[in-house]
Image: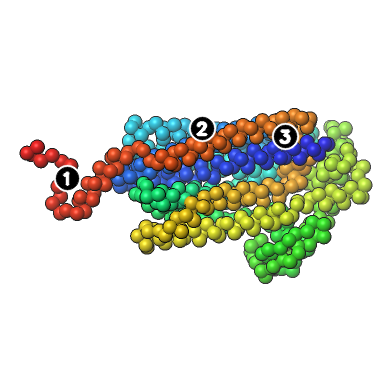
Amino acid sequence: MDLDIVELSRLQFAATVMYHFLFVPLTLGLSVIVAIMETVYVMTGRPIWRQMTKFWGMLFGINFALGVATGITMEFQFGMNWSYFSHYVGDIFGAPLALEGLMAFFLEATFVGLFFFGWDKLSKVAHLIVAWLVAIGSNFSALWILIANGWMQNPVGAEFNPETMRMELTSFFEVMFNSVAQAKFVHTVSAGYVTAAIFVLGVSAWYMLQGRHLELARRSITVAASFGLASALSVVLLGDESGYDVSHNQQMKMAAIEGMWETEPAPAPFNLIGFPDMEARETHYAIKIPWMMGLIGTRTLTEEIPGINDLVAESEERIRSGMIAYDALMTIRAQRAETPADVRQTFEEHGGNLGYAYLLKRYVDDPRDATEAQIKQAADDTVPNVWPLFWAFRIMVGLGFGFIAVMAYFFWRSSFRGQVYPRWALWGAVIIIPAPWIAAELGWIVAEYGRQPWTVDGVLPTALSVSHLSISDVLLTLAGFMVFYTILFIVEVRLMLKYIRRGPVEDVEETEIWRARHNHRLRTTDGKDPFSKTPAE
């Protein structure tokens, strides 16, 4: 297998997925924020909330449209660059993606049209229902995609069929309610809510600094701060649940995130900072917090978290077991129905480690011919590059706690200080607009880079998953995607900036009339409408 093809294919998929994920969090969060704003409009009848719904809904629509375009091209790569992966696990991986298209995307896309073009054709309540269906559809899309991704992290509800040489679905219920998938879903969705809240907060703060659209900005900050504070707290709490799942289902990833080379006595400490060294297999200058990792990873004071070195030794044993399974599989493939019962029994006993034998195909065509040195090298390959995971995780967590502080401050100012904000705080809100995207991308690096060398953890190595393409083929498509995505990025930024600079333009006159009438009622007690004509007129 030409590893250059593997690395180029990984680079292309990583670039397209991470670019697509620039749109996803804002879509998830803005859909809910817009639905909340329209709910307030329907309950109060105040036109300012309708104006807010339309304005933020316009920005949601721009982001949604371009996100769909990037998502469609991304999925082409499964058949184009990862054909063996598609063949090997397509029965399981394809089911959630198909349901995402049938149940979620069509729901979302249909009601997006009604949301934008149904203001004067639907009743207030009917349009509100449409807004919430758009939000539900957006989040449903994330659910099915993360169920597919969660299965790659923790492949449950499926088994390998030696007759077809493919993984086959045995329990869709287990795939759907995979603990890793559910934890990833709630954590990712909450992160999307924080992203949208920071975006709304930052844009509204910019309006306040300019002295424009102040009524919309103040109310938007209040919604963003309240919604964002709850979401930021959820991200941290649900991230803890994800960490607990990783410590049980992907122990090598957990050890790499922590830079934990040796198994620590329970409860394990948490490496707050340090400098992981892959060659020395040591984390230099580590500052540890006692007990913390044990409590996060196991929620006990007695259970150990295995270190990288012990996990490599375990991988070596699983590779040897996988070699036995591979030998039995070749006999089954050769003799078919005439395969002796003891050979099939051998495969049943060792088949769970077949994927580890496939790690040897990076070095030898037939895993049964692997040398001791190659077995040890394949076991070492199960260790992902530690320092990117170590620091990506810590920066992500640090930003997460920073979002809690920002949202708590603006919630306090909006709730107890009359919606008056210092200029330094408003400038700070503008400056941190990119921060949640940085945190989200780092989260995906931790999740996906930490799974290496596996495409499907413990089942299918990345080196075996790619299509048989030439380097020029991959370079050509990589260049094409980069050009296409760069154009989309420019379009997205220009459109967003254009509509943000312009500000709300719909329902402006209606909102001003309502505000004037409301202010008059507050100043007078005669109960008369200042805009109504007198009998003399």
Q: Give the mark toward the camera: 2 or 1.
A: 1
The answer to whether residue 461 shows anywhere in this view is yes
The answer to whether residue 348 shows anywhere in this view is no
Residue 187 x/y as whole percent: 57, 51
Amino acid on which the number 1 mark rests in the picture: Pro
Residue 46 x/y as whole percent: 30, 45
Label 3: element kind: loop
Along the line of sight, which residue is nearer the eye, 373 or 392?
392
Q: Residue at x 40, y 54 (%)?
A: 222
Amino acid on which the number 3 mark rests in the picture: Trp
- Of callouts 2 and 1, the N-terminal one: 2
Task: Give me the disc on residue 530.
Answer: 1
**Disc 2 target residue:** 106
Q: Residue at x 68, y 38 (%)?
A: 13
On the image, which quarter does residue 247 sit in? Answer: bottom right
Q: Residues within 10 Å of mark 3 (few under 14, many from 20)?
A: many
Q: Is residue 159 left or right of residue 509?
A: right
Image height check: is 76 above or below 347? above
Q: Residue at x 49, y 56 (%)?
A: 428
